[in-house]
Amino acid sequence: MEFFSIMKDPKWMTNIELVRVMLGQNDSSKELLSHELCDAIVHYLELRARDAPVTHEESKLLDLGLSQAHLEYLQVSQEFFRRLLYPAKTVIRNAGDLHRMMHHHGERTEENLFLISLNAGQEVLAKHFIARGSLTRVEMHPREIFKLAVTDNAVSIVLMHNHPSGSVHPSEGDITSTERLWRAGIIIGIPLYDHIIFTEDRYYSLQEKGHMDTFEKKRIKKGRKK
């Protein structure tokens, strides 16, 4: 593929092609980066995006032949684009704002759970990757979620997870897990403001669809019975 035609429409490029072009290579380059090195770079960037430890991966990249200058370029480039995609103190007005911020994760081929911590002004304090699941489900553990929320000094939180099936309608398991986490948030004092199920181009907000109100009515009704 010609270098110019690649750059005209990068969304059709493979990850290996993207890495090579990003590091200044094209079809006329005498020595292209190996598939092994390109795959290692992609894995390294994925880990950095999740704020996971990367010391071992950095050493591996250098051992595979990546220069220190190129490693630093990858780090700086990723941080630059992170700031463009997720500006500091982004104010969340509705579920659509959150979907626009996270929609690119909708292409993932397994369910992934994300946590968004908010302050009193509905500004984003932090975003966390929580867990990777299977094609049809992902585990949602309150302890892991609220531990991060407390660390972030969050006033409220939003959970988001993608549906690889293409349908954004919540399963019974999604609703049950959401109610369990909503109740945990009430007890801890960090309410679950919303849970959004999404694909790349669509989303379903449990808060906007009235599920949180239903949870509250059930809680009040249960309290009256006592």
Image (cartoon, rainbow, N blue to C red):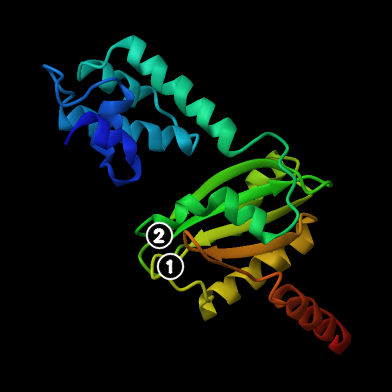
Q: Secondary structure at mark 2?
A: loop
Residue 141 visible to the viewer? no
Q: Quadrant of residue 41?
A: top left
Q: Is residue 165 above or below residue 6?
A: below
Residue that badge 2 annotates: 133
Q: Is residue 222 above or below residue 102?
A: below
Residue at (29, 46) in percent of width and height: 12
Residue at (64, 49) in percent of width and height: 116
**Residue 88: image location, x then y, percent:** 68, 34
The outermost residue toward the bottom is 225
**Residue 42: image location, x then y, percent:** 32, 35
What amino acid is labelled 2 in the image?
Answer: Gly
Q: Quadrant of the N terminus?
A: top left
Q: Is residue 55 left or right of residue 127?
A: left
Q: Quadrant of residue 182?
A: bottom right
Q: Quadrant of the C terminus?
A: bottom right
**Residue 17: image location, x then y, percent:** 24, 35
**Residue 110: image location, x then y, percent:** 37, 60
Q: Dots 2 and 1: beta carbons under 8 Å?
A: yes
Tag 1: Cα neighbours inside 10 Å, few (<14), some, or many (≥20)?
some
Q: Nearer the viewer, residue 157 or 38?
A: 38
Q: Secondary structure at mark 1?
A: loop
Residue that badge 1 annotates: 137
Q: Is residue 113 above or below residue 37?
A: below
What amino acid is labelled 1 in the image?
Answer: Arg
Residue at (44, 30) in percent of width and height: 53
